[in-house]
Amino acid sequence: MSHTPHELAEDFPHLADRIHALKVSNPHFAHLAEKYHELNRTIHRAETNIEPMEQLAETALRKQRAALKDEIAALLKHA
């Protein structure tokens, strides 16, 4: 499979250690990270036409991903 953009470690490369630590120590963060990962993979499959979907549905998923990323970024900032 091709490279999937928007992975958390790529979007926050300077916080990779903190991301890992929070995944291990904070169940809420781990849940958000897993949800982000699943959503990101779904979007990537739609964008690459592996599993095409309607444009409105894809846009809605991108908005959900952005909201999750904002929540994750806030947790990373305060950790």
Image: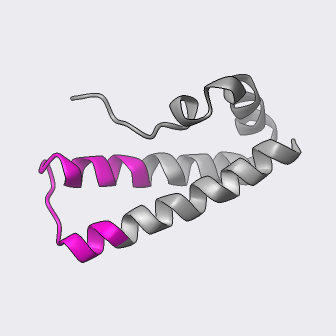
Up-down relation of residue 19 to residue 52 (above or below): above
Quarter of the image with the N terminus is top left
Horizontally, residue 42 falls left or right of residue 19, namely left
Horizontally, residue 78 falls left or right of residue 62, namely right
Quadrant assignment, res 58: bottom left
Residue beneath the point at 70% across and 37% down: 23
Up-down relation of residue 22 to residue 15 (above or below): below
Q: Residue 74: x and y, percent?
A: 76, 53
Q: Residue 19: x and y, percent?
A: 70, 33
Horizontally, residue 23 falls left or right of residue 78, namely left
Residue beneath the point at 45% across and 67% down: 63
Residue beneath the point at 48% across and 59% down: 65
- Residue pushed farthest bottom? 56
Up-down relation of residue 48 to residue 1 (above or below): below
- Give the magenta range: 39-59
Quarter of the image with the C terminus is top right
Dominant secondary-structure state across the stretch colored magenta: helix
Up-down relation of residue 16 to residue 72 (above or below): above
Quadrant assignment, res 11: top right
Please tell me how many numbered marks the rendered image carries: 0
Residue in front for this viewpoint, 6 or 50: 6
Reply yes or no: does residue 50 show up in magenta.
Answer: yes
